[in-house]
Image (tube, grey):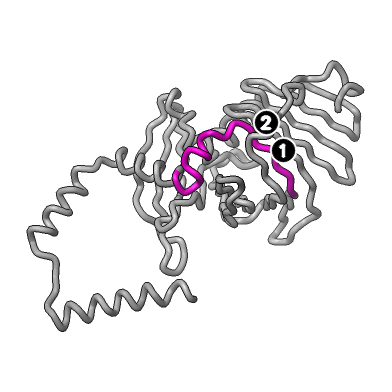
Amino acid sequence: MSGKHPFILRLLIAQLAIIIFGFALTPTFAQSAAAKDANVSGEEKAEQVLKRAIEALGGANYLNVHTVVSRGRLTPFQDGISGLPTAFLDYIAYPNRERTEYRSKGGRVIQVNDGDGGWVFDGASRTIKDMAREQVEEYLRFTLKTSVEYLLRGGWRKEGAKLAYVGRREAGIARRNEVVRLTYADGMSVEFEFGAKDGLPAKVLYQRKNAEGEEAPEEDRLAQHIPVGGVVAPFVIDHYRAGVQAYRINYESIEFNVPVAEALFARPANAKAVK
């Protein structure tokens, strides 16, 4: 509530000033402001939103991140009830390599995405397999291309995707988000919301086919942004499918630009060689 009162107070003061002093924008100023907004295209406005977001996340420090090592827990949800969390260890090497290790009572699972390939290790069955083409495409389309990092680091530009400004969207009491839309050549579109006040990424929205083959909305909600070594990162990500929470990611630690061995992404010769 404390963040709400100053806003209301300023609004009341402004209204009182208009009543008592007859203060108002002169036609010349109002017309020039409108003309200025009219001269800014939707694409230019969208680029301004991205630039502000980059600055909010750390500016040059954010853009100079090459590797990320994070640890945390992934908690599934079913009918609004949380399940047992699974610990994970994640390695990212930009622009398109990622290794995620999951540990639970069922054993250890490793999934590696390396460009347009990858492999999966199942500790319970002690098997290692190349990732199927469908799995690779799913990762590239619904993990990489819907990520805030892919948007802000400009990976979409070389694909000929189109950026547009959607407008402002309500995001709670006295809160609004700036919304931009990225449309890929194949027609897939992703909307990204950034806080109008702080510029930080807040939501990612897109459509994905469900088990019945029907297009359904998917949404990531980013929260608890914490500065780490000059870079700001969300420590909580809630994922929703058709408006229902599917899982939550809680990061316990995030490290930037730490050494990540090339061997982590290389496919071992067999299951026994997995480290």
Q: Earlier in the sequence, mark 1 or mark 2?
A: 1
Number of marks present in the image shown? 2
The answer to whether residue 208 is left or right of residue 124 is: left
Residue 103, above or below 244: above
- Looking at this view, is 144 or 206 the one in front? 144
The answer to whether residue 79 is left or right of residue 170 is: right
Amino acid type for the residue under numbered disc 1: Asp
Image quarter (top left, top right, bottom left or bottom right) of the C terminus: top right
Could you tell me residue 37's position as x and y percent? 21, 49
| Residue at the spot 34% in from the left edge and 78% down from the top edge | 9
Residue 73, above or below 145: below
Could you tell me residue 117's position as x and y percent? 67, 20
**Direction bottom: furthest residue:** 20
- Looking at this view, is 259 or 169 the one in front? 259
The magenta region covers: 55-72
Residue 160, above or below 167: above
Q: Is residue 241 visible?
A: no
| Residue at the spot 68% in from the left edge and 27% down from the top edge | 113
Classify mark 2: helix, strand or loop: strand
69 magenta-colored: yes
CA distance for labels 1 and 2 = 7 Å
| Residue at the spot 7% in from the left edge and 58% down from the top edge | 28
Amino acid type for the residue under numbered disc 2: Glu
Q: In the figure, residue 5 lies in which quadrant?
A: bottom left
> Residue 74: which disc?
none
> Residue 90: which disc?
1
Could you tell me residue 68's position as x and y percent? 65, 37
**Direction front: furthest residue:** 229
The answer to whether residue 72 is left or right of residue 198 is: right
Badge 1 vs badge 2, beta-carbon distance below 8 Å: yes
Residue that label 2 marks: 98
Classify mark 1: helix, strand or loop: strand
